[in-house]
Amino acid sequence: MSIDQEFRSGLAAELDALPPGVGLVAALERLSPAALTGEDLAAYLRGCARAQNRGAARVLDAMHHLGRAQAQGCERLAAVDEFSGDEVAAVLGWSRTMASRKLDLAEDLADRLPAVGDALWEGWLDEPKATRFCEWTRDLADDHARHVCQVVLPEAPELPVGELIRRIEQTAAALDPEWAARRARRAEKNARVILSPNPTGTATFSVCDLAAPTGLAMRDRVDALAAAVRGLGVLTPIGVLRAEVAARLLDGTTAGLTDRDVALLLAAEYHRQATPAGDDGPGDGGPGDGGPGDDGPDGDGPDGDGPDGGGTADGGPDDRGLDGDGPDDGGPDERVGDGGPTDEDPTDGDPTEVPDAPGLGQGLLDLPDLPDLPPMIEGRDPRSGRVRSGTTELRLRLTTALGLDEHPAAVPGYGTVLAPHARTLLHRHHGGEWRIVLTDDDGRLQRVLLARRRPRHPHRDTGPRPRGEPCTAIVELQVPTTLLAALTPDDHRTRAGDWAPLLTELRQRLGAGRDGPPTAGPDDHLRRRPRAETDRWVRVRDRHCIVPACRRPAHRAELDHTIDHAQGGPSVHANLGVVDLHHHRAKHHAHWRIRQPSPGHFTIRTRAGVHHVTRHKKVLEPLPRPRPAARPRPLPADGPHAGPDTDDVSWRQTFLRRTAGPAPSGGTRTPPARNDTDDPPPF
């Protein structure tokens, strides 16, 4: 997404044409932001940012010179050393640690990643993103680090920092999958539990370096239990509720209780309080924590415009629509649920309303003053006592699932998942909704199918979900149509899994339907919620919230009618887009204007009068071909003599010096935190 070029004229065009330097600074000095509006004000801000980026590049370059300077003349040391940070710290009044960290960045940009340094100097990349390039390629050999920058750097200006990190990880894993898998196994051997105090007097409890499938399973269970508790009328902010669930699962106070009874216990404790915890903070029941939102002025507000009012509708495993090719999946009042912990926010509208579920008791615990159990707290096997697992989504290529390549997968809202871990998750989500997303050769969406069959796998333990518990996961298998047509099903009957039935089904259905979005139904202009196949198509097409720099995953966002339903807007793909709750509120309360000139192409005019446009997104993100070394590349902790050959000792020492950093007691560096605190579970 970007500012639309056609809206730039006059002053805005002049400022955007100026490169960073004396001319740009002089032009900015002649202007006052108080006298600017709309596109001119946006251009002024972009100009200030370019000038700041050039200034940051100058500061880093000056640090690099001062850290290597010698009193005898202008000659510089070959590299910074342990005393370089003292020079910078004394001049700027910084600590030696801070000065050394900045010097490391300066040397990286000068020597190892010059293309990133050039982008910072030219003003179109900022220092935080340049820092992420250095931090998240530090484990890589120099040639791989530069190749990652070559692939990702052109995308960086429009990517938020979290998405930039994901693309760096994804590209690095694709370059040398074997090295990435060895690094993950090495880190897993240093798994540890850390308890650390906070300045506020609270504590942070961390479980570090677990295998990705294990960590995701832990998150999903906490999300599911928090959803179950929320369904019992608990209005505690969802972040606090998730933390309370995780703490109670670990502190021993719920030992021996089933998940069902844990949810009931937490709800009972909440309802016994004289003043609900939700009354103390602005987030209680508000737009940021999954509680009730505000309807827009036309009644088509954030919590009514999505297919389920709670932003989690995906046409999930309980929806038996065929594949988006067939007729209507249900009547106008059909629920389009994702099979997640809840298909409707029970607090929608009235914060005190609790959904009725007649006939369902309170379970083993005799807890007073509790509403009836909502349906989502019951699994398919009532004896299991476990709530349904939290909704998650796994996106990977069909060729990776088949073992034909080792491309990394993605879990939206989490990040990159290595191919072996992705196959583990695929087997664990065997009972979820499997979407087969067909693309053209450029990776653009052509068709969405729902798989009726699943590959047959030998029995193996892939996680804590017991037999019979519903799986609410979404699995997106991506494949170009031409590649799918070229696959021979019988070639994929192996001991690791029999994919022949699924591949046979997909090949048969290639000629049975048509490419493109689902056909509009006769009642689409009447129904408020879209049909299941339309819902799936729009979420796959948009991938995430359509607003610039917002990456809220589609399955955790809402579907917005571009022309409000109350104003006659039909529930068809050409009038729907993925918008998260916050930006849905911006449309109704901050007077943002969203238009959709063609399906999947949006223009957005913000309250400030700035115009943005979207580009059609590719389903298959570009990945480089693997570039393995002639011999296994060293891992960050291998040491200078770990390899079979010793003729590259100096390179290994340089590698270790560049990858060295403050390490926790486990011996491995902890990467920068990138948790999105505004990413709630699917409520």
Image: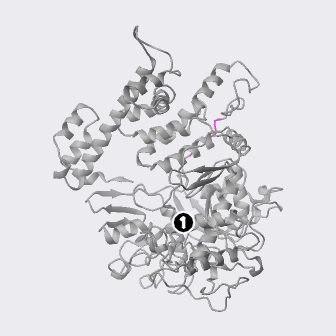
Residue span colored magenta: 623-627
Task: Indicate whether 662 appears above or below 612.
Answer: above
Above or below, 407 against 461 in this view is above
Q: Dividing the image into 4 quarters, which one contains the C terminus?
A: bottom right
Image location of residue 328, percent across then percent down: 54, 82
Q: Residue at x 41, y 20 (%)?
A: 66
Instruction: Give me the residue at 49% from left, 80% from top.
Output: 347
Residue 659 among magenta residues: no
Q: Is residue 46 left or right of residue 424?
A: left
Expressed as whole percent of the image width and height from the top left, the position of residue 414 reads 58, 56
Give the overall secondary structure of the magenta segment: loop
* Residue in front for this viewpoint, 82 or 632: 82
Pointer 1 local density, CA inside 10 Å: few below 14, some 14–19, many at least 20 = few
- Seen as rendered, the residue at the extreme top is 72
Viewer-proximal residue, 315 or 25?
25
One can see residue 282 in this view: yes
Front residue of 410 and 324: 410
Q: Name the residue type under label 1.
A: Val
Q: In the image, is residue 348 above or below residue 586? A: below
Quadrant placement of the N terminus: bottom left
Q: Report the coloring of the rendering.
A: one colour
Q: Of helix, strand and loop, which one carries label 1?
A: helix
Side of 489 where 484 appears, left or right: left
Q: Residue 612: x percent and y percent?
A: 33, 57
> In screen coordinates, is 349 left or right of 142?
left
Residue 650: x, y in percent? 64, 19
Q: Pointer 1: what residue? A: 240
**Marker count (numbered):** 1
In the figure, is residue 348 to the left or right of 11?
A: right
Residue 518 in view, yes or no: no
**Residue pictured at 47% horizontal, 48% vertical:** 161
